[in-house]
Amino acid sequence: MNSGTDEYDVVVLGAGPVGENLADRARAAGLSTAIVESELVGGECSYWACVPSKALLRPVIARAEARRTPGARQGADAPLDVAAVFAHRDAFVSNWKDDGQVGWLDSAGIDLVRGQGRIVEPRRVAVTQPDGQERSLVARHAVAICTGSSAALPPLPGLAEVRPWTSREATSSSTVPRRLAVVGGGVVAAEMATAWSALGSEVTMLIRGAGLLERMEAFAGELVAESLAEAGVKIRTGTSATAVRRDGAQGPVTLTLDGGETVEADEVLFATGRAPRTDDLGLETVGLTPGGWLDVDDTCRVRNVPGGWLYAAGDVNHRALLTHQGKYQARIAGAAIGARAQGVPLLETDRWGAHAATADHGAVPQVVFTDPEVGAVGLTAEQAEAEGRSIRVVDYDMGQVSGAALYADGYRGRARMVVDLDRGHLVGVTFVGPGVGELLHSATVAVAGEVPIERLWHAVPSFPTVSEVWLRLLEAYRG
Ligand SMILES: Cc1cc2nc3c(=O)[nH]c(=O)nc-3n(C[C@H](O)[C@H](O)[C@H](O)COP(=O)(O)OP(=O)(O)OC[C@H]3O[C@@H](n4cnc5c(N)ncnc54)[C@H](O)[C@@H]3O)c2cc1C
Ligand SMILES: NC(=O)c1ccc[n+]([C@@H]2O[C@H](COP(=O)([O-])OP(=O)(O)OC[C@H]3O[C@@H](n4cnc5c(N)ncnc54)[C@H](O)[C@@H]3O)[C@@H](O)[C@H]2O)c1
């Protein structure tokens, strides 16, 4: 650690999942690589986002599934063992220690430099190390910014004094608030309302839009909202908080809504989107504006930087704020950096080429780990129409699939495929229902592979699995 020269082929800023993968690919291309990390190696995803949230949610979903399974219901109506759920979460985040991930960097031959990194001139990064010492790193070929995002808070009067929960507290708290207000209707809000309601909080969601999960097909948010309401979550749509205050240091929080009404809670979670971590990166020294998302081409190279030495992958480029998609960008960017360093004259940057993050444009998969789960890839019907495509939308009630009926009593869910009629393949698929997260990759293969719909007839789903929904969708399409 911290050994080696100050000069590397590649310097990566941020050791989240994306920075780690990019560094790994650069090493695999034979390039010497340093990675700079100001907090924990593993990033937001490992300690305050994907991993702890899914560790909190898994027992919630397992209990819900047992409740829907005759013969397994016994005991499933009991409250969750909250201490065991938190212990499970704490184990998955290694108690917020990063030794395991540091060991992996070592084994991959990547040098870790701890501290806050800033670009000070083209290809040069200064790192303020935890002991206050400055270390200067020069990158012969590329600097890659993988500094991710942090919770974005609205400019509400009194918000800072209230000490609201953000995604960090919502994923790391070991105290269950009696009443939790959740502001926002996106993925963090939906998942955390699911988790904390099951852990024992009385949850009230305050959503300024018309419903949950507004970037997905409307039925996804509707089915999740229906289930949350059945679990006792109060959902208020079309409402915004205009002020917020806390009584004393430990007292309750009062949110004033735009209609003048108030909502009282013991904690309030603001799940109101993300902001790029680019405000203190020295971007101004290379002609870029601090604080904004970084605009990249399909090789993940930042546009308008003379010399083409600067890359940005993951949340920070705002193409898709998802770990798996950021890691995909890291693989593409790592390959492009490697090829350019070797002087390969022509990169494969055409659609679906080895050096083009093509999937970002129309084949991004996402699973929302609510009950029911949502799995979606590609375009919604509305997005496909907005792109001017000629489409046909096919819907199917997933409860009608025998495999689904066997999977859970009273299985509720819906599937949709969006067919591009001119191109003859699927451009979007959405599943909502218990267990659909594991079904999604089949749809991702169909969309990213642009599999002709006629060929999908020959991809036979096993009986009796939930996957037979594919057959039902195709039958409905053929008529
Ligand atoms: C509650 C929640 C749940 C989520 N669940 C999922 C999920 O289930 N699946 C999914 O795919 N996505 C999920 N996401 C999104 C996912 O967390 C992000 O897409 C992912 O973390 C992005 O990875 P990244 O490496 O780009 O950034 P990060 O994970 O944010 O890592 C960036 C790293 O850079 C470091 N850094 C920042 N600035 C500097 C600097 N100047 N110098 C040195 N280091 C620096 C940070 O300390 C951090 O370690 C979730 C997000 C939230 C908030
Ligand atoms: N399972 C997963 O894949 C998963 C889970 C969690 C988060 N994520 C990723 O993390 C990112 C962040 O999630 P998120 O839920 O914070 O963001 P989001 O953009 O999905 O949702 C933000 C919500 O906050 C609302 N909002 C924004 N500003 C507001 C304001 N001033 N007042 C009231 N409401 C406001 C929006 O209308 C929206 O409902 C997402 O892009 C998502 O991809 C993924």
Image (cartoon, helix red, strand yellow):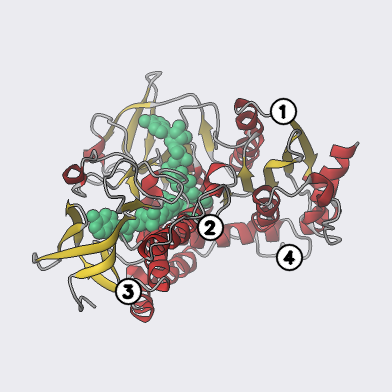
- Please state which amino acid type lies under the numbered disc 3: Ile
Q: Is residue 193 visible?
A: yes
Between discs 2 and 3, the one toward the N terminus: 3
Q: Is residue 201 visible?
A: no
* Residue placed furthest toward the bottom: 107
Q: Which secondary structure, mark 4?
A: loop
Which tag is nearer the camera, tag 2 or tag 3? Answer: 2
Between discs 4 and 1, the one toward the N terminus: 4
Q: Which residue is mark 3?
A: 110
How far apart are the two marked residues, 3 and 1, measured between alpha carbons?
48 Å
CB of mark 1 near ligand 2 (< 8 Å): no
Graded by Cα atoms within 10 Å as few (under 14), some (14 to 19) or many (20 or more), the crowding at tag 4 reads few
Q: Which mark is residue 390?
A: 1
- Please state which amino acid type lies under the numbered disc 4: Ala
Which tag is nearer the camera, tag 4 or tag 2? Answer: 2
Graded by Cα atoms within 10 Å as few (under 14), some (14 to 19) or many (20 or more), the crowding at tag 1 reads few
Residue 448: x, y in percent?
64, 50
**Marks 4 and 3 in Cβ contact (< 8 Å):** no
Which residue is nearer to you in this view: 275 or 73?
275
Q: Which mark is residue 354?
A: 2
Between discs 4 and 3, the one toward the N terminus: 4
Q: Report how many numbered discs are placed on residues in the image.
A: 4
**Marks 4 and 2 in Cβ contact (< 8 Å):** no
* Quadrant housing residue 87: bottom left
How far apart are the two marked residues, 2 and 1, measured between alpha carbons?
29 Å
Residue 51: x, y in percent?
46, 62
Between discs 2 and 1, the one toward the N terminus: 2
